[in-house]
Amino acid sequence: MKVVIAMDSFKGSMSSMEAGRAARDGVLRAKNAEVVVRPLADGGEGTTEALVEGLGGTYVETEVHGPMGGWVTARYGILGDGSTAVIEMAEAAGIVLVEAGRLDPWHASTTGVGEMILDAIHRGCREFIIGIGGSATVDCGIGMLQALGYEFYDREGQLLPPLPASLGDIVRIDDRGVLPELEDCCFHIACDVSNPLCGENGAVYVYGSQKGVRREECKSLDEDFLHFAEKTMEFRKKIKKRETEENVSKGNVSDGNVSDGNVLDENISSENISDGNVLNENVSDRNSSDGEKMNSGRSVERDVAETPGAGAAGGLGFACISYLPHVELKSGVSIVLDAIRLGEKLSDADIFLTGEGQLDGQTAMGKAPIGAARLAKSYGCRVIAFAGSVAEEASSCNAEGMDAFFPIVRGVTTLAEAIEPDRAKKNMMLSVEQVFRLL
């Protein structure tokens, strides 16, 4: 019998790997089985810890600018391969870093996020897993971009500060200061919202109030977001033209592909272009799964602002897919499942164990345990889940891949007692043991 275990963290009680190891001990008390434990997270809080602990990584601490401009100590992880960094943007630009009652979106910036990326690049990292949840910012990512070397100028030629008020004043974007090594990097952006950049379903109108944007400010800020998107498109067209002209000068491309300032990818036929949209440059399947593709260059679509997730983290999603090279934006669960190579472990497994602190209706809507359970079912595994508590609506999880689920709390207890780490680990071990005595 082969058993694969991937538990999400039990917040305030057990980390992902602690819960997984406790479950492993329970299996081995009942069965002589091969047991594999992998970390699990959803791309948000706790992802760095799960992947570092589960994949043999190390933690790095670095001083960066916090959301309000002061210095903060941000922590990220470098995985065991020495080249993959796991970053949670909330470490540098998270709303949790702003004192209660002191939210000020007009002075909040993502500069520290770019500084974390720079620090990791200087340490040799070229693969990045970045979670962009929990932000305090609405700067459309220009803070991050400026830290990476991009510069934004107004019509007087003055360098603009990386703040939301600058977005509507941008007339020129300069990339001459961008770190050359950035082009060698690949970015996996964990995003679990589908909002576009602008409009009534965009970043400002949907999430702005959470960060302190007043209702009467939404219209003008949303218009500034749209202005930045338009300037970004103009900038990308110029970059494409420059790159193609360089290829022409090297004899790599016929100059027939350059006309009237509009640049087409030499590998894209006119049949692929409709409604004025220009497709991505050289799409490949590098590091992709589940049929999703990854851009081998920066996005240049006319409607990139409408891309699901562009409005995430106050427009940081848009900045990532527009300016970062080799980038994919998809659900955090999918990115984590790829990183831990769960499919490889499940290919010859019999049983899969997963779980989290509380199973409820939200779990069934696609949280990490369900994402992992669906994958396990695709390999023909039986799926069993364990949780600290189980809500009545958790029965909906059965239709989403969980064959059965069980609470681990034994007897009447207070919440404080139930989440005490040693007690929780013991409860997990004993509960799993009893289930496996039936198998």
Image (spheres, rainbow, N blue to C red):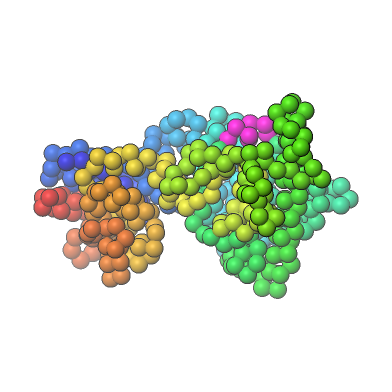
- Please report the bounds of the magenta region as a residue range: 179-185
* Residue 1 horizontal side relative to residue 118, left or right: left
Q: Is residue 130 above or below residue 134?
A: above
Q: Residue furthest left?
A: 438
Residue in view at x 30 percent, y 66 percent: 396
Residue in view at x 45 percent, y 30 percent: 81
Q: Quadrant of residue 411?
A: bottom left
The spot of residue 384 in percent (x, y) is 23, 54
The spot of residue 393 in percent (x, y) is 30, 70
Q: Residue furthest bottom?
A: 216
Is 183 magenta? The answer is yes
Q: Is residue 180 above or below residue 305?
A: above
The spot of residue 160 in percent (x, y) is 79, 50
Residue in view at x 77 percent, y 34 percent: 255
* Residue 226 horizontal side relative to residue 132, left or right: right
Return the residue nearer the eye: 213 or 84: 84
* Residue 168 horizontal side relative to residue 185, left or right: right
The spot of residue 334 in percent (x, y) is 43, 49
* Residue 229 horizontal side relative to residue 208, left or right: right
Is 226 magenta? The answer is no
Return the residue nearer the eye: 422 or 303: 303
Q: Is residue 141 visible?
A: no
Return the residue nearer the eye: 295 or 29: 295
Q: Quadrant of the N terminus?
A: top left
Q: Looking at the magenta stretch, what is its main secondary structure?
A: helix
Q: Quadrant of residue 215?
A: bottom right
